[in-house]
Image: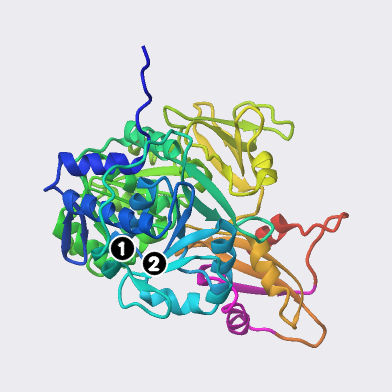
Amino acid sequence: MHRPEPNYNLAAQLLKRAELDPDYVAVHFEGTGQTYGELGARVRRLAGLLKSRGVCKGDRVGFLGFNHPTFFETLYASATLGAIFVPLNFRLTGEELRFIINDAGVHTLVADPELIPVLATVQDDLVCRQFFSLADAQSVFADINAAMAEAEDYLEAMRLGAHDELLIMYTSGTTGLPKGAVLTHGNIIWNNVNANLAFGGNREDTQLVAAPLFHIGGLNSMTLSALQQGATLVVLKHFDPGAVLAAIERYQVRTMFGAPAMYLFMVQHPNFDQTNLDSLHLLTVGGAPCPEALIEKYQSHGVQICQGYGLTETAPFCSFLSPDKTLQKLGSAGKPPILTDLRIVDSHNEPVPAGEQGEVVIRGPNVMKGYWNRPDATAEAIDAEGWFHTGDIGYLDDEGYLFICDRLKDMVISGGENVYPAEVESVLYTHPSIAEVAVIGLPDDKWGEAVTAVAALHAGESLSLEALREFATPHLARYKIPLRLEIVDSLPRNPAGKVLKFQLRKQYT
């Protein structure tokens, strides 16, 4: 007897949820609630619009905007047609966006009106066939709501398998050019099964979304899982600590994902001690280790902290540290979830014993399909046995808990955002005063790590941090611009000429 596979299409699941719970609130945004029935209707109408404008299975649909309900509508409408959704980082410059949009071959782009001026600087060089604006159409951007009003509903989501592509999420590469991690419908679903088995969740939950949705942490640490379950999202356009605290109290928020810096800003806000946090059950943390004092502060208010480790390429979870072990295993990233394997390997890709450092590798149904149009990078990242090589150095203790020590790729994590030194260095090297420069991450109480430029200058030249930041601003997103500048006579190098960044980190920490 033929037993068909389930429809893995995430949009089909959302539309089924809309049928099951049409009156239950899916999203609160800026004081307005959108029910699952209303969300489903908007998804069907937007899918009809995209179909009428030529979007087919496998086409890419981009979204450039701040957190907004239309982000979800565009994602699910694209998935309904079997198209691939490409969320874009709103902090990027026009040049950075041009590369990603063209690399992905975006067919249709939806943008926030506030960000259209950034796109306008490169619009003539974009491959997109059509443009939509969330409101107030500008230039070639058509008003998406007006266009949807004239479209017909697309009633049924395409039947898709676990390995069909859902997302292309761009992550900067060590060469300076971003790579698009291709995540499938199965990657997202199995990641969410992992997450639910680790810390639960149900349709009675209210989850606050303040981390940017273009980031895998904001999008899929808990958010898409909440919509699968029929829970309620409280979506903030931007992270603002005061607004977060007010929303927690107003909407009786139970869960939230964020970087340690976000939780620190909340604690430092003057309203923190007056805010009723009784509803808040669990804060999940990613992007950097959570300081002990911050954990204890939230625990004193009855709020649990769940530390996690993950990457864009793993959709994102690789490991969890359960709340009961938060202080006992301080600094640990926890253990891998039920459906995912994790091990530490040496330079020959052989497992190493407990306590010995090596590269963290991951295998499981949450590991990406590969890098978009980059078979070379895919083959380098995923070995013949299916292990994804993270580039992070870590070790497992005697009880199997993961500790991250360093990064093979020298990546800096600032405020939960990944910053790759090679990309920043390539810009700074063009400054006329700089002879050589190395970019490193140094500990920072606010951001986790501060992007730091260590530069040797040409004879007779001088350079201030303010001048360097002004120079870099047109070329780099703000979170990539150095927060510190150290001037040296020369950079330390090994006999082969490689800059010894570990020496610089040690010197300036």
Magenta residues, as a range?
A: 463-489
Please say whether residue 465 is one of the residues in the magenta stretch: yes
Q: Quadrant of residue 191?
A: top left
Instruction: Identify the amino acid type marked 2.
Output: Gly
Residue at 63%, 74% in the rendered image: 485
Q: Are marks 1 and 2 in contact (CB under 8 Å)?
A: yes
Q: Quick check: can you spot residue 470?
A: yes
Left or right position of 328 against 204: right
Looking at the image, the residue that sits furthest to the right is 495
Question: Mark 2 — residue?
Answer: 65
Using the image as rendered, state which of residue 214 and residue 126 is in the foreground.
126
Q: Quadrant of the N terminus?
A: top left
**Horizontal and vertical percent position of residue 443:** 54, 60
Q: Quadrant of residue 172?
A: bottom right
Q: Quadrant of the C terminus?
A: bottom right
Question: Mark 1 — residue?
Answer: 68
**Horizontal and vertical percent position of residue 138:** 38, 80
